[in-house]
Image: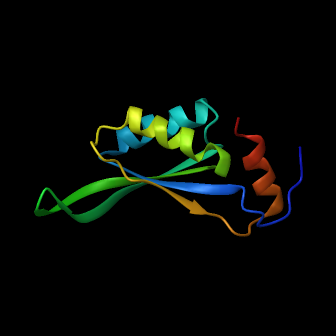
Amino acid sequence: MERHEEGDGDVVFAYITAGSPEEARRIGRALVEERLAACTNILDGMTSIYRWQGAVEEATESVLIAKTRAALFEPLAARVRELHSYDVPCVVELKVGRGNPAYLDWLRDGTA
């Protein structure tokens, strides 16, 4: 396993919202099975308030956090767009600064 300096910028989290816990699980499992993410976390029951097509909407969604490497963010985002039911899914990259070096190495090892 290759060691990296803590906070060297190659680890990112992808923040994704999904319309249901089932959709979040389906997408999360695919990302891990395809080694686009080492791990995904699902947080159910989030309330979103947003503007869509000129109206203010409110919906219950699930948050999916995919832990990956920066080099895999674009393929991960493309795969999420293929699997997602939304026309415009939320898929954003959050850079990870520092963390447990052993965990960050495990994350790197778990991705393609």
How many numbered marks does the figure carry? 0
Q: Position of residue 17 (x, y in %)?
A: 38, 52
Horizontal relation, residue 103 to residue 52: left or right: right
Assign the N terminus to one quadrant of the image. Answer: top right
Q: Position of residue 86 (x, y in %)?
A: 28, 42
Q: Residue at x 63, y 57 (%)?
A: 12
Horizontal relation, residue 42 to residue 107: left or right: left
Q: Position of residue 110 (x, y in %)?
A: 72, 40
Q: Residue at x 81, y 51 (%)?
A: 105
Which residue sits furthest bottom? Answer: 98
Q: Position of residue 6 (x, y in %)?
A: 81, 66
Where is 17 relative to 74, above or below?
below
Q: Nearer the viewer, residue 110 or 20?
A: 110
Q: Residue at x 66, y 43 (%)?
A: 38
Horizontal relation, residue 20 to residue 35: left or right: left
Which of the 4 image quadrants contains residue 81? Answer: top left
Where is 22 relative to 89, above or below?
above
Which residue sits furthest left? Answer: 55
Assign the C terminus to one quadrant of the image. Answer: top right
Q: Residue at x 38, y 53 (%)?
A: 90
Horizontal relation, residue 52 to residue 101: left or right: left
Question: Coloured how?
Answer: rainbow
Which of the 4 image quadrants contains residue 103? Answer: bottom right
